[in-house]
Image: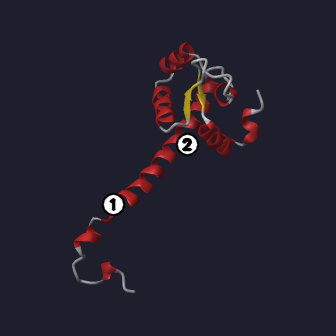
């Protein structure tokens, strides 16, 4: 079939709006969110190490960062607050029952996918 761009016929109105359909918009948005989330997880890992923490601080559900530690990270590295918000909004991170910031199953899965399962096992 000849691509529509090669013909001089105008496109039907229902095809001109194809880019704005929820399904195509949703998949693009999902890809952007996942890319943004992966960037934030990478930045978070770097900032944790730079500020004396280890990756297990947020990958182990029973550990986590206390609110004062989050505040200190946000003050020292303003990108932390943005990344924290992205991680929370995408449900890759939450506060555990002790009120400490940790990754959810989704966040841990992505972190281990990016850095390897052993990345959080070595202190």
Q: Label 2: which residue? A: 38
Is the Cβ of the residue at disc 2 closer than 8 Å to that at disc 1?
A: no
The nearer-to-camera label among 2 and 1 is 1
Which residue is drawn at the image coordinates 63% and 22% (left, top)? 64
Q: Secondary structure at mark 2?
A: helix
Is residue 120 rendered to the left or right of residue 20? right
The crowd level at tag 2 (other Cα within 10 Å; few <14, some 14-19, many 20+) is many
Is residue 119 rendered to the left or right of residue 58? right
In the rendered image, residue 77, in percent from the top left (x then y), is placed at 50, 23
In the picture, the quarter occupied by the C terminus is top right
Whether residue 25 is situated above or below residue 70 in the rendered picture: below
Whether residue 123 is situated above or below residue 87 in the rendered picture: above
Q: Label 1: which residue? A: 21
Which residue is drawn at the image coordinates 47% and 26% (left, top)? 81
Whether residue 63 is situated above or below residue 3 in the rendered picture: above
Q: Secondary structure at mark 1?
A: loop
Kindly indicate the quadrant of the structure image that contains residue 8: bottom left
Residue situated in front as seen by the camera: 26 or 73: 26
Q: How is the image coloured?
A: secondary structure
Residue situated in front as seen by the camera: 77 or 3: 3
């Amino acid at each position: 079939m000849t691509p529509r761009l090669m013909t001089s016929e105008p496109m039907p109105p229902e095809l001109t709006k194809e880019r704005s359909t929820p399904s195509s918009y949703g998949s693009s948005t999902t890809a952007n969110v996942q890319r943004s989330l992966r960037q934030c997880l990478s930045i978070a890992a770097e900032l944790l190490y730079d500020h004396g923490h280890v990756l297990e601080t947020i990958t182990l559900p029973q550990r986590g960062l206390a609110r004062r530690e989050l505040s200190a990270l946000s003050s020292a590295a303003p990108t932390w607050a943005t990344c924290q918000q992205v991680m929370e909004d995408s449900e890759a991170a939450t506060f555990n029952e002790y009120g400490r910031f940790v990754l959810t199953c989704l966040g841990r899965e992505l972190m281990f996918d990016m850095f390897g399962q052993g990345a959080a096992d070595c202190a």
